[in-house]
Amino acid sequence: MLGAFLLGEMESYLPQPGDLKEWEPSGEPQYVKGDDLFLLIDGGAEVYHEYGFKQAIAQGFKMKNGRPGNGFNLEIYEMLDPEAAYGIYTFKIAGKGQPLDVGDAGLLEDYYLNAWKGNFLVTVTGFDAGKDTLTGIVEAAKVVMSKIKSTGPASQPPLVHLLPSEYQDRMKLKFIKYLKGNLALFNQYEFDSRNIFGLRQGVMGDYGIARLFVFKYENAAESLKWFENGKKELRQNPRFKYVELQGSTVGLTFSLVDGKGRLSYIKNNGPYIFIVQGNETDAKQINEFLFYSISKSK
Amino acid sequence: MAKRISRREFIKHSAAVGAVGVGTLTVGNLFASKTPSPIKTKVDVSVVQGQNYFDAAMKAVEQLGGIESFVPKNSKVAILANPQRNNPGAFTSPEVLRAAIKLCKQAGAKEIACISYMPVDKCWEPTGLKKVVDEEGIKLVLTDLKNEDLFKPVPVPKGKSLKEARIMNEFFSYDVLLDVPICKDHAGNKFTGTLKSLMGLNSPLNNRSFHKPNWTTDVNDIHYLDQCIADLNTIIKPNLCIVDATEFITTNGPFGPGVLLKPQKVVAGVDRVALDSYCCTLWGLEAKDIFSITASYEHGLGEMDLKKLNLKELKI
């Protein structure tokens, strides 16, 4: 039966008794596929579907000597393709932890870690941030990754390479979010609850004092169409102060300021929409960074 | 039939704590309570901060005038806690739940139960909430989430998006509802607190429809979820909300793991719009940007302007 095969395949990735030095499975694993992801992670399922979700399995672990209170949860998500797995990995990380040599990339943050490899995302959550638990979760992630077959050398989606690694030594790329829809974008910044930019593929780079968004479209005509739509909607959104910018880019650039003084320059260029965002007080720097980013993209 | 305090006694006591009136049971306006509760209290949002979360919860209700204003003697009380999953910061603190139970006992409740459709082995036990239920000697009444027959269709006359809810049958067996949620991030709509927690009474199948209109794959309007949440709140009114704002995730909600914030606060009141408006500020959000709050406000369910609220904060 196909369903049983899929379950068996996912179960085969789980650490088995004996795979981990100090830990063993606790309880039965929980397997879900497709729309049933809702049963595992409730309302958090939506963003997985936006990236492209196939199936998942979750298993709890406890210490072998039965010490109460210690433990961790391990989840393995198979997404539809490596781009989706990379995307949901970037969505979940806060970007401030310790990089791990696990899978294609991994990050240990406080009490949990995320790592991706091919189509797969692995999340391991400790119930505490003690040394034993953190050692255990890293070990568990490595075991899982060793069981997942590699699909080739790790590669980030090409769009990610449009993000400059730094700008004039002042701004360095700290972390990346890869976006595949408005829900992921909404979690970074609330332009609108509706998909006013028709976002299907985008990337955000955080540079400390500024953030750069790049949205990619099929061609320049489509990009312009969504740029004009976004402009129309944002112009009448009472949450923003809208400014049409003058000069050679009339009609192709505008700016917004929100209630917290965050400034966004939004510019259409070829098959892309570029957005640079920062504090109003850094307007000149942000504007320069926008044009620098565009020039690097050509 | 449970012995109840007289309506005159209850109204007199409610007036003493500043309630301006009592709710009435109208069509489409479900109260778990067959005995009305205060619709307004002198203190709108009671906040207590402290390292002992049990004490903070007890004090938060004390600041409202005491549990007796909300739980009549000999009543049957249903508690709605959030046992989501045992990822840190994703579930109601066991000590806050324990305080809610103790308060109900203090009020002389005849029967106290946690009602839920979340499974025991994956949710209630790993979070430690089952242990509290057992230690306090109350019931855990579970509904099989896969059996739609165990949920009763209820029309939502004021619903703009949600026209019919499906509320678990067990809900109707109780006189009083205490909502004991955790406030935290939610990837679907930025925030979950007292308003969204009532989805825990609504069937999972019906809840799924909140996330996608007609369960299609075209998610273009995050508003839809929030409007459904607000609509659901027009038909259910907890007698009291005790919000766990002690330690919670501010990213990757509702399930986590995510960045943990630890304000160590318990927040209590009856105005769900006010409570959520306060709680979202704990990690820099504003009520006007949370659509479930603004939609609920537009339904007339409470006040979202913190400047208009009587907020009482205490550190213990």
Image (tube, rainbow, N blue to C red):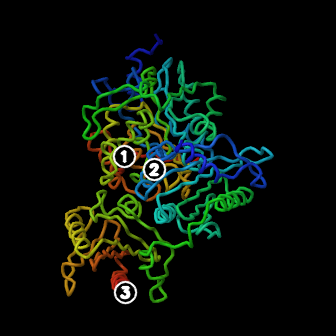
The residues tagged by marks 1 and 3 sit, at their Cα atoms, a distance apart of 39 Å
Q: Label 1 belongs to which residue?
A: B211
Q: Nearer the viewer, residue B288 or B233?
A: B233
Mark 1 vs mark 2: same chain? Answer: no
Image location (x, y in percent) of residue B233:
35, 36
> In the rendered structure, which amino acid carries the disc numbered 2?
Ala
Image location (x, y in percent) of residue B48:
53, 45
Q: Chain of mark 2?
A: A
Q: Looking at the image, do the residues carrying marks 1 and 2 touch, with CB atoms under 8 Å apart?
A: yes
Q: Nearer the viewer, mark 3 or mark 2?
A: 2
Tag 2 or tag 3, which sits nearer the N-term?
2
Residue at the image point whose x is 38% and y is 44% from the top: B274
Residue at the image point whose x is 34% and y is 36% from the top: B232
Q: Label 3 belongs to which residue?
A: A292
Image location (x, y in percent) of residue B263:
54, 53
> In the rendered structure, which amino acid carries the disc numbered 1?
His
Q: Chain of mark 1?
A: B
Q: Nearer the viewer, residue B275 or A74?
A: A74
Query: Which residue in the rendered view is the most extreme toward the top?
Result: B1
Query: Which residue in the rendered view is the most extreme toward the front?
Result: A1
Helix, strand or loop status at disc 2: helix
> In the rendered structure, which amino acid carries the disc numbered 3?
Tyr
Image location (x, y in percent) of residue A179:
41, 65
